[in-house]
């Protein structure tokens, strides 16, 4: 029987403002050892592909023709995601259900080493506290748009990836998008269904160093470049 875990409610009034999240967004590969919290994982999964309009079923990511071809997985590492003060989410591959805001355990066990090797031994896959995987069912979109639908699916993958970046940044977390991996191996490790194709991996953890960008630094950068190009104020 499939084990399903109800996720904590999402928070619409949390984290840093969007402009600051945009300014601080980075591909971060150096992480601390502090575990994640389930409430943070819940917020990340919702940001990637959660329901944003209960009446019409719209999601946080734009989708061509509302065909929504993506599926979101979370790979929990051992003792890396706190459910409560002394309890961790069991390690394994989980599939996110946007309609119930829950995750179902697809493959139980420590998948970290196998995922690391299938990702061309990129160290940050191993050093993270978990990994979010974006998969695509291309037929959902190509059945409406034909070959053009393939492009629309990849565009949607990019939207979801940026959502994850910004939400992670807003929560003080770190991620990095990975496109280099052995597709079939990753699909087998995660337990993807036959019609799902892996598109993106995004390890998640806490950064060693927080964002330090300032408003003054941005303004100074613009001023220097305007002076070099002799731009005139309107």
Image (tube, helix red, strand yellow):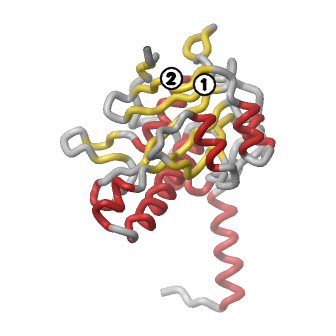
In front here: 226 or 178?
Answer: 178
- Residue topped by disc 2: 105
Image coordinates for residue 184, horizontal then vertical, percent: 62, 46
Quadrant of residue 91 within the rendered picture: top right
At numbered mark 1, what does the secondary structure look like: helix, strand or loop?
strand
- Residue 20 visible: no
- Residue 130 visible: yes
Residue at 47% from the left image edge and 39% from the top image edge: 193
At numbered mark 2, what does the secondary structure look like: helix, strand or loop?
strand
In front here: 11 or 221?
Answer: 11
Image height of 119 relative to 110, above or below: below
Image height of 23 relative to 10, above or below: below
In front here: 157 or 221?
Answer: 157
- Tags 2 and 1 touching, CB below 8 Å: yes
Image height of 128 relative to 169, above or below: above
Image coordinates for residue 222, horizontal then vertical, percent: 64, 74
- Residue topped by disc 1: 92
Residue at 48% from the left image edge and 51% from the top image edge: 160
Residue at 75% from the left image edge and 46% from the top image edge: 29
- Horizontal side of 5 relative to 204 (left or right) equals left
| N-term-proximal mark, 2 vs 1 | 1
Looking at the rendering, in which quadrant would you find the N terminus? top left
């Amino acid at each position: 029987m499939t084990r399903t875990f109800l996720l904590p409610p999402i928070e619409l009034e949390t984290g840093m403002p969007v402009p600051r999240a945009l300014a601080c967004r980075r591909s971060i590969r150096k992480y601390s050892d502090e575990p994640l919290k389930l409430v943070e994982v819940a917020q990340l999964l919702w940001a990637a592909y959660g329901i944003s309009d209960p009446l019409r079923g719209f999601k946080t990511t734009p989708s061509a023709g509302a065909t929504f071809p993506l599926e979101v997985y979370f790979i929990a590492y051992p003792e890396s995601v706190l459910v409560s003060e002394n309890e961790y989410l069991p390690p394994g591959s989980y599939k996110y259900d946007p309609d119930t805001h829950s995750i179902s355990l697809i493959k139980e066990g420590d998948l970290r080493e196998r995922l690391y090797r299938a990702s061309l031994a990129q160290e940050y896959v191993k050093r993270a506290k978990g990994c979010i995987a974006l998969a695509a069912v291309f037929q959902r979109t190509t059945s409406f748009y034909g070959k053009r639908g393939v492009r629309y699916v990849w565009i949607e993958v990019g939207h979801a990836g940026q959502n994850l970046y910004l939400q992670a940044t807003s929560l003080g977390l770190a991620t990095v998008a990975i496109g280099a991996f052995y597709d079939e191996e990753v699909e087998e490790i995660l337990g993807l269904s036959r019609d799902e194709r892996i598109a993106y991996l995004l390890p998640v953890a806490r950064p060693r160093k927080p964002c330090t960008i300032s408003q003054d630094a941005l303004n100074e950068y613009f001023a220097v470049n305007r002076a070099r190009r002799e731009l005139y104020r309107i």
